[in-house]
Image (spheres, helix red, strand yellow):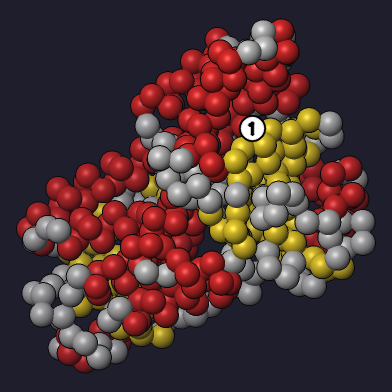
Amino acid sequence: MKISPKPYRVGIIGAGPAGATLAALLAKEGVDAVFFDDGKRPEMVVGESLIPRLVTVFRRMGIEDEVAKLGTYKPGVTWIFDENDALELSFTAMRGVLPTYAYNVPRKPFDDLVHETAVKSGARFIPCTVKLETGRTERGELVPRLAAETLALVPDWNGRQPDLLVDASGRRRLFAKLLGISARLGQRKDVSHFAHYENCVMPKPAGQTIITRLKHGWSWRIPLLHALSIGVVVDKEHAKKYGSTPEEQLEAMIDQNKPLAEAGMNRRRITPVTTYANYQLISDQGHGEGWVSVGDAYGFVDPMLSPGLCMAMTSAEMLADAIAQNRPEQWDVAFQDYLAWFRENLKAWQELVDIFYGGQIFALQRTGTDMARRFPGKISMVMQRHFEKNISGMAGGGLTTHPYSRNLLRFMTRFGIYGHEPADFAIA
């Protein structure tokens, strides 16, 4: 295996998209990147609908052509907020900001592709259950360490700890649990059920992801190459009203929502129903002397607008740059900047998601439609396109933290809604 001429070694705990992306990008820079994973991962993984910001990461990694082959071209997203009305956003509104498309992908082949890319780039993969222990720095700071039996799996490290340990363990948050680091949790405590189906009516335009508001939650329809991924996200207690098992609950919610029922009238489920907990979290600490977190191990937000995989891989990209473009003695400051960027992105995503949950975005859309009818013409059309470009740019990951876009949305949802109550469109 290629051993880096660089004077530092990075151990990455976790081989999901965040860990593998980080390993790939570091290896390309000549860093001795070793990533560990026990391979325990569910067959079905959420996060199949991607956003345009990720296309820029794929291009940097040199894998967009492979992603396109295993995925489905995604031109935009449609939100159905009642049976007769919808908000359709096309990613073409992001021209000049981001790529004007994204992809929907089956996660296992996609994750395998990212993993293989890391290995081909020169990173070393060690399949194992990592053993961790705590240590103390000279200043008395509690830090994570690799146990001797794990260090022995990398013989050329000669039993020495790597210069940097990275927690890419996802929601397991291994370092945070080891060190007793607390986190700020979001308010929603939902449950998500999803499965893949054949013989469904596929969304139009081809590849479009469909989000449908339910009585006590929302659903997704994600078109893949050979199936339609259908999932529901609802309050845990409300889900019990639809049955006693995940299968009963998912099927009943599909049947009792008109848009879902019509799309799945002749559906045939071809995978087991997979269940996830839906919650939001940001760790109170993301790095210390000799360690740092990336992806879900640091924080994640509600999946409604598909930010999860984007934040996992873009945070890996940002962290790779912080590591490779700075000397080890500069990492502390670089990691502070990286985590400030990460926190701001998570907060911005959650703010955007909350506006959808609260119904403001749909009440605003209704207001805009009313205004266009009353005052047709070029001015109304320009205003609508300008607003859609900013909303699309935020939902696509390019303008999520952009001050102008965020302030425009805040202003419009506060002062631009007339004749409609956001509560009428809220997701309970």
Q: Is residue 301 above or below residue 198?
A: above
Say which residue appears at 62% left-offset and 32% top-offset: 356
Q: Is residue 169 above or below residue 56?
A: below
Image position, residue 391 (x, y; %): 52, 32
Judge from the rendering whether residue 405 lies leftward or rightward of residue 231; answer left or right.
left
Give the secondary structure at mark 1. helix
Q: Viewer-proximal residue, 158 or 310?
A: 310
Judge from the rendering whether residue 347 lies leftward or rightward of residue 1; answer left or right.
right
Specify the quadrant that holds the C terminus: top right
Q: Viewer-proximal residue, 193 or 143?
A: 193
Q: Is residue 266 above or below residue 334?
A: below
Q: Viewer-proximal residue, 368 or 110?
A: 368
Image position, residue 367 (x, y; %): 67, 15
Image position, residue 352 (x, y; %): 52, 33
Q: Amino acid at mark 1?
A: Tyr
- Whether residue 245 is visible to the viewer of this picture, yes or no, is no
Say which residue appears at 28% left-offset and 41% top-offset: 340
Judge from the rendering whether residue 223 lies leftward or rightward of residue 339; answer left or right.
right
Marker count (numbered): 1
Judge from the rendering whether residue 9 lies leftward or rightward of residue 396; answer left or right.
left
Quadrant in the picture for residue 251: bottom right
Say which residue appears at 36% left-offset and 41% top-offset: 343
Looking at this view, name the residue that lies furthest to the front: 378
Specify the quadrant that holds the N terminus: bottom left
Q: Is residue 99 above or below residue 352?
A: below
- Whether residue 121 is visible to the viewer of this picture, yes or no, is yes
Image position, residue 32 (x, y; %): 20, 77
Quadrant in the picture for residue 398: top left
Within-10-Å neighbours for mark 1: few <14, some 14–19, many 20+: many
Say which residue appears at 77% left-offset and 44% top-offset: 237
Name the residue carrying label 1: 357
